Image (tube, rainbow, N blue to C red):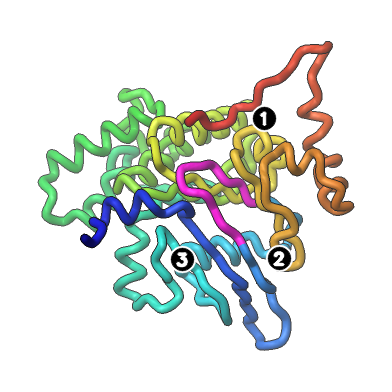
Amino acid sequence: MTETNAEQQSNIQYAVDMSDVKKSFDGKEFVLNGIDLKIPKGKITVIIGYSGTGKSVLLKHILGLLHPTSGSIKVSGKEITSMTDEQLTKLRQDYGMLFQYAALFDDMTAIENVMFPLKEHRRDMPRSERLQIAKDRLKDSGLDPKHFNKLPAEMSGGMRKRVGLARALALDPDILIYDEPTTGLDPVLTEMVDNLIVSTHNLRKGSTSIVVSHDLYAAFRIADHVAMLDSGRVLLHGTPEDFLNSEIDLVKRFVAKGVRKELQPKNGESEEPARSTE
């Protein structure tokens, strides 16, 4: 008896499985130089690293926007390196993407921004249904209904992030990707976005969250797994505790600069990081 698609999906351990992925733009230097990375399904994985280590290029490969020079990339068990443009377009409907600065359409209200992907990819869906889905996603993201008809210029930075997240959720994706979600935000808004990532993940059981971040403390605070890139390779992939206990010199220096001091208990009290719950 053959397995159904649902059964096959349930047997997949990794949302993304990259094996010996290399990428060179000039045929000489490799931006990605043998990436081996398995991103567990249903978890929050944060990808960190110094500037220029290949984080953005890695993300574009996961999205199918760049094709590797060599290697294998499987998303939900499907090899994407051999997919046609049409197949990749369909695959991307399984992704939800929150861009660095939310990237909302300036001339659309909050609710119109969230309805946009539904209008593009669910053209046979009645407008009333698209409208209801948009309202539900905005509520899930914590935006008060009184702001639904505001333009981006009329909203605060935190409100725009919520709208961006609601839009990313519009197509009910299996994989949520956050590209530097706290860049340019003050500490209060940064904590709000971190908590929003975790609460959204916990609300959508079985979904996978991938966060590319420069914020060390936030990464260790919200992640189930952390992957650190260096020179186009994965230097270390493990739990936050694995990083805190690592003897790798570069990891120790990276952690010491922005994480360890933040995670130390204060006045003898333990701090509980905002990890996802399963």
- What kind of secondary structure does the magenta stretch mostly adopt? strand
Q: CA distance from mark 1 to mark 2?
A: 30 Å
Q: Which residue is mark 1?
A: 187
Magenta residues (range): 37-47
Question: Does label 3 or label 1 sit earlier along the sequence?
Answer: 3
Mark 2 neighbour density, 10 Å: few (under 14) some (14–19) many (20 or more): many
Q: Residue at x 32, y 35 (%)?
A: 137
The amino acid beneath tag 2 is Arg
* Residue in front for this viewpoint, 201 or 116: 201
Q: CA distance from mark 3 to mark 1?
A: 36 Å
Locate residue 201: give its quadrant. top left
Residue 191 lies in quadrant:
top right
- Residue at image location 84% in from the left, 41% down from the top: 257
| Identity of the residue furthest to the front in this view | 1
Secondary structure beneath disc 1? helix
Q: Secondary structure at mark 3?
A: strand
Q: Which mark is residue 233?
A: 2
Nearest to the observer: residue 200 or residue 202: 202
Q: Position of residue 50 (x, y in %)?
A: 76, 55
Residue at 70 percent of width and 39 percent of height: 240
Query: Which amino acid is tagged 1?
Result: Pro
| N-terminal label among 2 and 3 | 3
Q: Which residue is mark 3?
A: 74
Of badges 1 and 2, the one in the foreground is 2
Q: What amino acid is at disc 3?
A: Lys
What number of labels is visible?
3
- Residue for point 46% across, 43% down: 42
Q: Could you say which disc has been placed on residue 55 in the image?
A: none
